[in-house]
Image (cartoon, coloured by chain):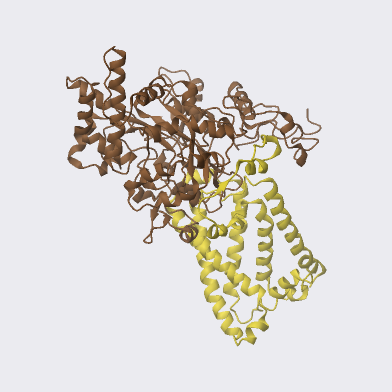
Chain colours: A yellow, B brown
Amino acid sequence: MSWGESLLWTVSPYVTLVVFVGGLIWRYKYDKFGWTTRSSQLYESTLLRVASPLFHYALLFVIVGHVTGLLIPIGWTNAIGVSNDAYHVNALLWGGLAGLATLVALVLLIWRRRANGPVFMATTVNDKVMYAVLAAAIVSGVVTTAAGYAPTEVSYRTTVAPWFRGVFALQPDVVAMGAASGLYKVHTLIGMVLFVLFPFSRLVHALSAPLGYLFRPYIVYRSRSETARQRPARVRVRQNRPL
Amino acid sequence: MRVMAQIAMVMNLDKCIGCHTCSVTCKQTWTNRPGVEYVWFNNVETRPGQGYPRRYEDQERWKGGWELTAKGRLRPKAGGRVRKLLGIFANPRMPSIQDYYEPWTYDYESLTTAPLSDDVPVARPRSLISNEPATIRWSANWDDNLGGDPSPDPVLEKVSGEVRTAFEEAYMFYLPRICEHCINPSCVASCPSGALYKRAEDGIVLVDQDRCRGWRMCVTGCPYKKVYFNHKTGKAEKCTFCYPRVEVGLPTVCSETCVGRLRYLGVLLYDADRVAEAASVPDERDLYEAQLGLFVDPESPEAAAAGLPADWLEAARRSPVYDLITKYRVALPLHPEYRTLPMVWYVPPLSPVVDALSTTGHDGEDADNLFAAIETLRIPIGYLAELFTAGDPAPVTAALRRLAAMRSYMRAVNLGQEPVVPDAGLPEEELRAMYRLLALAKYDERYVIPTAYGNVPGVVEEAGCPLDYDAGRGAQAPFGESSGRPVPVSIENFHGLKERQTSDEVTHERVNLLNWDGRGTPAGLFPPRKGKS
């Protein structure tokens, strides 16, 4: 492994992390108003109602797959008696299905965005860049998943995953990562670009998944003084007496 | 008992001439921005008619409001919490832009740039959604004054078929609509982000623009379809009850500019502990009485003990809205069957009955004639009952009888005859008070609005004493944008709007972001670059 590549796998994950976390804090602090799904359902609903749930649900599966694949060490599954082959058959089957579904839905969504006049008009440059990276990440992911079944391929469980876990332990296993195949490396790099883009694009809406809705009472009351306090100073009005 | 206060509205439909001044002034004030071109916080519908958005009252289709579960508990008609979250990736019950109407502008430029020719140049319509040349097919008010196309009105469908045609010939009236600022708002209940809320002090239902994430469930949840999606900002917007005005004791813009003086604003006190109980009575027809039962008499000891500011209690005692709803019982809620306990009520129209009588050669203002006509003209009663009392004709008849009694009593007074008090359940002095409130409708009797600060009602001063600003909390920076005394919302809006309306183009020295439409970068958005002059 070259000196440059080892530097890449050491530095880039931390740059990504800093930009991701810092960007999110910045965005939340200064652009709560822009923090939205920016839905285009008002313009076009028929295609969206099929493609969007398909995309998002499949993506949830993909995320679960990534979490399992990257966070669970190979020793653990061995310990509970799941053979490496059985693991990979499952990963290929479910991961491949979820990845394909995501890809199909993404193609539908991008086509909808391009073909429908009002939806295309509402698409910003930021959106286009995000779509390009997202598409690249998904395509490379599906290709990697398919290629991962070839017997010659080194498993990501002994290469990418240890490196990934090491990143959070502040000891990225650069050697393991260097042993991964080119496909994995490309997919990892694209993934990092996606995380860098995340705070600055519409992707942030993923972090506002409204799980709190399940636990709150239906009707929300807020007092006027409470809202006035949250307003920026420029438009603040006088506090009222407590009622 | 937990007494809460709400600023509520009553509209006297007898006086509405369908001039749309309320709609236009509201639009100029709140929704004259890109992204909300199609949005009318206030609209005036011709009844019978489809309404805006089209057939919004068809809840089998739109699933707005609440329903009772098998156990008798309240649940949003579009589904409870889990179902909402599962369907979050594409709202299955969202009206499309075509259900409202596709907003448009005209190619005005072609009027001046067209080459010289024998034909007069025309400004062709252009869609504001797709930017393509468009054919105008529908608008917020396409069936204005038609009042006759029977098929699409979901309310008419509930009235029996054979009487429909006769009814359409006899009857047409206007229904101005704003957000109902419900006591049990289903839009608030539908919002997964918790961005919609009901203000504890005055009951105004608002969208927190910083917390809205654009899930669009509120659009579905509101049975009146009065929450809208801003397609430029990706956020929900709705009627604000002109809260910056109401806070300082001013009536809403729609009320202020109503040429018919038909809107009334005042405080209503209600028992917040019994809201769920009132909204979940099994029979829809009991909802009107159940809601009446929620209201707390401002003269009662409970109201006095509730800890409200003195001027709010005083305003509640002088409230024209309380009188019309509870004392005279002439105002009725719009579609109580949605179980949202709406707080914009309506005095049903009597005039068409009077007109119908007069055309038959009878004395249209004689009490006996009128009473008989109200009873026999069952068709309008049935329709009005579907609108205001979930189909129960009794409260509508009673309200109309009281209006008729007032009318014939006051006619006798004005003609110098011996006034007879018709039997409508109201004593003489109340008939006179009701006449004063409904017919003379003085400004300060129509609008009794306590300010948010606890000032004397009528003292209009938002900025107040500078010492009361909370400088102590370190909210203001010593330099830059946030320095100095904060500018109250209404003043900032006022100046921004004035500037925008009086300048030919966007050339502000400093851009007021409240008025910035989000398109492009107007001069002044960023400070000038160094080296460029």
B368, B332: nearer the viewer: B368
A29, A39: nearer the viewer: A29
Q: How many marks?
A: 0
Farthest-out residue, top: B416
Task: Tell me the residue at 44%/46% (across/down).
Answer: B222
Where, by quadrant of the figure, is residue A209 drawn? Answer: bottom right
Position of A240 with respect to B120 (left or right) is: right
Q: Residue A20: x, y in percent?
A: 70, 57
Q: Is residue A69 above or below residue B470?
A: below
Screen quadrant of the C terminus of chain B: top right
Q: Residue A146: x, y in percent?
A: 57, 73
Task: Tell me the residue at 52%/55% (across/down).
Answer: A217
Q: Is residue A134 above or below residue B113?
A: below
Q: Residue A224: x, y in percent?
A: 61, 41
Position of A60 with respect to B415 (left or right) is: right
Whether residue B128 is visible: no
Q: Is residue A206 above or below residue B355?
A: below
B229, B351: nearer the viewer: B351
Whether residue B404 is visible: yes
Q: Residue B137: x, y in percent?
A: 36, 35
